[in-house]
Image (cartoon, rainbow, N blue to C red):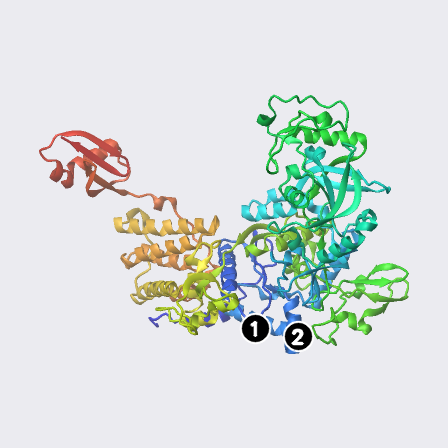
Amino acid sequence: MDSRYNPAAIEEKWQKTWVELGLDKTPSASNKPKFYALSMFPYPSGSLHMGHVRNYTITDVIARLKRMQGYRVIHPMGWDAFGLPAENAAIDRSVPPAKWTYQNIAQMRQQLQRLGLSIDWECELATCSPDYYKWTQWIFLQFLQAGLAYQKEAAVNWDPIDQTVLANEQVDNEGRSWRSGAIVERKLLRQWFFKITDYAEELLNDLDKLTGWPERVKLMQANWIGKSTGAYLEFPIVGIDEKIAVYTTRPDTVYGVSYLVLAPEHPLTKSVTTKEQQAAVEVFIKEVSNQSELERTSEDKPKRGIPTGGVAINPFTGEEVPIWIADYVLYEYGTGAVMGVPAHDVRDFKFAKNYDLPVDFVIASPDDVAGFDLTPASEIGESPLIQIDYKQAYTEPGILINSGAFTGMVSTDAKQAIIEYAEKQGFGKVRVQYRLRDWLISRQRYWGAPIPVIHCPNCGIVPVPDKDLPVQLPEEVEFTGRGGSPLTQLESWVNVPCPTCGTPAKRETDTMDTFIDSSWYFLRFTDAKNEQQVFDSSKVNDWMPVNQYVGGIEHAILHLLYSRFVTKVLRDRGLLNFDEPFQRLLTQGMVQGLTYLNPNKGGKDKWIPSNLVNSADPRDPQTGEPLQRLYATMSKSKGNGVAPEDVISKYGIDTARMFILFKAPPEKDLEWDEADVEGQFRFLNRVWRLVTDYVAAGVSRKKAQLSNLTKAEKDLRRAIHTAIQAVTEDLEDEYQFNTAISELMKLSNALSDADKNSPIYAEGIRTLVMLLAPFAPHIADELWHLLGESDSVHTQTWPSFDPVALVADEITLVIQVMGKTRGAIQVPAQADKAALEKYARESEIAQRYIEGKEIKKVIVVPGKLVNFVVG
């Protein structure tokens, strides 16, 4: 037997064995409780990084544990394989996107298999494969049939470099594209949308069902949905038979409206603009059209506007108010118009001061109106009576002033009263509104699932018949990076007969947002090879929802919200019987590397790659300037990455797994430190020696007689069962892998000091190997077989603790004199106060320190100490 731990030899051996045994295959029988363990699937970039390793190791530990606990487990893997990087690679390298993508998938699959993850590779899928996107297209048609997919002209975010539309979430806070970094423009295009707003209320309410999700993620989703209750009010336009509709959560301020603002894109903008203002308004609209939505709504930028010359009537006062357009109002949000109340809104106040517009206070602090006559006006439109001039917007609740019949009311009560009045008069009503917008799914790119509709001059939008799915991406495509989607250039693909009437028609050339592919992949895993259906509903309903989902916090809104929405739609189409896709969610922290920064440089040049720096005296190799040391998320641009293969070749997979699990709780960021990696390697070597020394000693393995154990054996058995209890609790509750591994270390220490000839020692060795199995699966299986077992350790039943073993026969009693500790003795654990005092008085310690002294008082803390107070 080799006394040395050789990870490379045993890891390759056991991975082959597991494949031969089919240990990771998804069971077809349903005679056990199910457990669905899932990591968010990766984009096939071609190389695995430490963030991947952390994500998949966490999920693998959970999957392995659940199998040992008697669950039937599905633990699949796939590839989120459509998207811009493949198309950009095609442009840069003159390689077809499919070829580039499938090469990367092959490389990353090999890397993942090298990690020894207990994945069922028979479930594997790739979203770019026609046998997958056929069903993505089929799901699109389900949305179309349900009236949840539609096309409309919309002002969209346009990436001028990548030549595609971006969702709002794909534009950063500087107004740049998340992919190309280009300043995003606004453009009017016909786009496809999914009506996620139809599900806004349910998506919001069902967050309460997600008890296994981090509160932070649920709050982010609730804020994104953004429910508010307010008033829908209509302001007649002077001179034309139209009204401007606004939505406001502050109807109590309506008597303070001093102007209205339309979005520059609002259809009424042309109608209300006077001839005198027409030229100036057109210039302003053109300027605003080149700004991204984030630029227009950013809090730290001044709001710009221009009067249209048009005028509207405040229906509450009968007074005329000017109509403006401004960059901060977006047509897609609310009604595309807002009422300006500068006295009671910080943004409106700044805007009014900037453009010298009236500021009329209609709510005041109760203290500031004490003594004023707050009798309500008898007639609407009566002149203001109370003059208060705050130096800034008053946004707190207060008392209504100068508000006609509502003067004197508390502002919170006035909201409802004003809405009721507007409803009776016919110019307003209560409305619930959401910040959430419909999901823009069109992309003007090639490498995505084609939208399966045909545009016929006679029939309009015609769905591609199910029998003709998938609408496959053509391969004879030229990639130049210019002029939008290459699909639009391919007449042989675009021009087709209408499936309904046979008239020459055209295919839709937009492809779908890749978030659609990832919004249902977890359903397909349960029936991945089904060629006849999107999935068998009985299989999906059996395996779903996902019991444990693991992935980054960056997906808290987009992917998770869209997945919840798609699940609910498919439920309503009769395909599913559950409401939510993911029961528990774990958002793992980032992996950070030691990073060097030159504070005197800007941009990407400020990051100095670690391999160019002398860690003892970190200086810029070009300038000699001293560098700052910090931990930052690993990335190519910072030059602080650690290649998984480098760590594995030096220490083995099990050590890499143990370090990643031990270094930090899974939801926290992890600082990579090779010294700590080395520490885990030493621990696994220690476990290796414990087992191999035990086996080499040839100890008889007779069964322990629990009624006849020595004190040392009782102590060891208590250490064993304490470890079982603690590790199980750490893995069951909050997945505290770091503290679980600490418990394994404690158990190995207890075994190191124990008698190898005891049958309790044999129990301890076997228990240590079984508890280690989910964390370090290769070494655990090797050691299990060295112990003489023929089956894999991963097929064993997870150990359960014996409550009797946890009860101590003896405790350590501390003896104090005048509060100062003088020593300790062992006493029976069940001794009462009187007995504890007697043991303490009779001890050699007490005799030595209190002999000849008067004991004035004895303080007994049961289970802990006895303190003698002496004269």
Identified at 53% across, 53% down, the residue is 586
Q: Is residue 83 something one can see in this rendering?
A: yes
Q: Residue at x 38, y 68 (%)?
A: 618
Secondary structure under tag 2 reads helix
Q: Amino acid at mark 1?
A: Gln
- Given residues 654 and 770, the one toward you in this image is 654
In terms of image quadrants, where is residue 553? bottom right
Vertical arrangement, residue 149 with respect to residue 871, above or below: below
Mark 1–mark 2 Cα distance, whole angstroms, equals 18 Å
First of labels 1, 2 by sequence position:
2
Is label 1 or label 2 in front? Answer: 2
Seen from the viewer's position, the closer of residues 688 and 696 is 688
Asked which quadrant contains residue 464, the reply is bottom right
Provide the residue designation for mark 2.
90
In percent of width and height, residue 416 lies at 70, 30
Residue closest to the eye, 490 or 837: 490
* Residue 727, label in figure: none
Residue 107, label in figure: 1
Q: Quadrant of the N terminus?
A: bottom left
Place of residue 208 in the rendered image (x, y in percent of width and height, measured from the top left): 60, 42
Residue 9: x and y in percent read 42, 73
Q: Amino acid at mark 2?
A: Ala
Category of crowding for the residue at label 2, using alpha-carbon neighbours closer than 10 angstroms: few (below 14), some (14–19), many (at least 20): many
Q: Residue furthest left?
A: 852
Position above or below: 130 against 304:
below
Judged left or right of residue 236, residue 18 is left
- Inspect this view and state whether residue 775 appears: no
